Image (spheres, grey):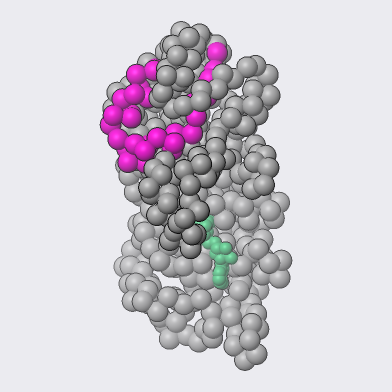
Amino acid sequence: MNYNKKTVYDIDVAGKKVLLRCDFNVPQDKATGAITSDKRIVAALPTIRYLLGQGAAVIACSHLGKPEPSFEKWVKKQTEKGKDPAELTEEKWQKSLKKLTLAPVAERLSELLGKPVVFAHDVVGPDAKAKAAALKGGEIMLLENTRFEKGETKNDPALAKELASMAEVYVSDAFGSVHRAHASTAGVAAYLPAVSGLLVAKELEVMGKALDDPKRPFVAVLGGAKVSDKIAVINNLLEKADTVIIGGGMAYTFAKAQGGEIGKSLLEEDKCAYALEMIEKAKAKGVKLLLPVDTVAAKEIPADMMGMDIGPKTIELFCAATRGAGTIVWNGPMGVFEFPAFANGTKAMAKALAESGAVTIIGGGDSAAAAEQLGFADKITHISTGGGASLEFLEGKELPGVACLLDK
Ligand code: ADP
Ligand code: MG
């Protein structure tokens, strides 16, 4: 995977119409629809301001939530969820779509930018086309939710072409969506010169360097609930890192595979063979593989113990292994950090990263949330903004929304 891609700095956008794919998939209050965190909108501002400052006419777009653009499929899905088909009217379906309009995002974006944001009530329909045609340099508009179009998630070339027809340049700045081959995240690049925005550029620069040319020693810290979620990450990082640390729920499968007693802890029996294979791979590659030596257990049911966090000796062992590191990549909490009683391991790890002096990178939605919640976020070099995307990045997978951009 080549991460060396052209950015907005490498292309002339003055006076041009720029289609900018953002990640405006903001959390909303279920009842009122109010935006509960504008972090993602704020994160998009540097690229938007740069483009507007260069005199580009910015046509921003994004998806929001998971609308079902086909009435028939919506009925099918709702019926599967146990809803009474007789009550599933077209009106209700329309209402479910309206809940996912990007109109509130346009409003918030306008407040943050301190200038009007024209809102189009469709994606590639007459309203979008007319407003895009009228848009001048230094002005910005936002298209309606891209997933209102059936072709979006199917990466339909017809939709990609329609999107592209409104602009002259494509800028990809929705890192959280680059692992998806959708019309607005990848397909559109077939019809326009495509470069990264500043958010995507930073993700590629920091994470790309860590994977391709890390400052050594390179320590990977892996945790989270399931081995099955992390198979490709463990496998890929064993190729790159000098030390791999495994904690979290998945460590119990490794322990069990080696004949350990794990009580009622999280176990994926069918992944024991894989765990042994990884232990062998680490040996063959000369990678130091560290597993927990003690555990913090909860008494769920009397006599049934369940491992919920790494123990104090393990904390010492793992933290010591991060000292002197040149690069540390962390994905997956060390324990069930959502409960304060089981957050010690994750907290100690976050602190170790913060104090390490290494280039530190956190990928993964829950890991990023943990670092933030525990108060270490500002001491980490880079916290990836993409949950699934950063995971696929660490897996070494080709990301369609990155592969489609122009090489430097
Ligand atoms: P990320 O989103 O950073 O990739 P994951 O989704 O893989 O991380 O894992 C996060 C989840 O793993 C958290 O909800 C956490 O509670 C859970 N987890 C961590 N340790 C354990 C454990 N010992 N038993 C069960 N679940 C665990
Ligand atoms: Mg997760």
**Which range of residues does the magenta coloring cover?**
139-167
Percent x, y for residue 132? 46, 15
Q: Is residue 368 left or right of residue 391?
A: right
Is 109 or 294 nearer to us in this picture?
Answer: 109
Percent x, y for residue 11? 40, 17
Is 260 or 316 nearer to us in this picture?
Answer: 260
Percent x, y for residue 361? 53, 48
Tell me which corner region of the image, top left, top right, bottom left or bottom right, holds residue 359: top right
Whether 319 is among the magenta residues is no
Residue 116 seen anywhere in this rendered image of the structure: yes
Percent x, y for residue 386? 50, 45
Residue at 47% x, 43% y: name it.
Answer: 90
Q: Looking at the figure, which quarter contains the N terminus?
A: top left
Q: Is residue 208 above or below residue 48?
A: below
Residue 355 seen anywhere in this rendered image of the structure: no
Is 348 or 302 nearer to us in this picture?
Answer: 302
Residue at 68% x, 42% y: name it.
Answer: 32
Residue at 33% x, 67% y: name it.
Answer: 281
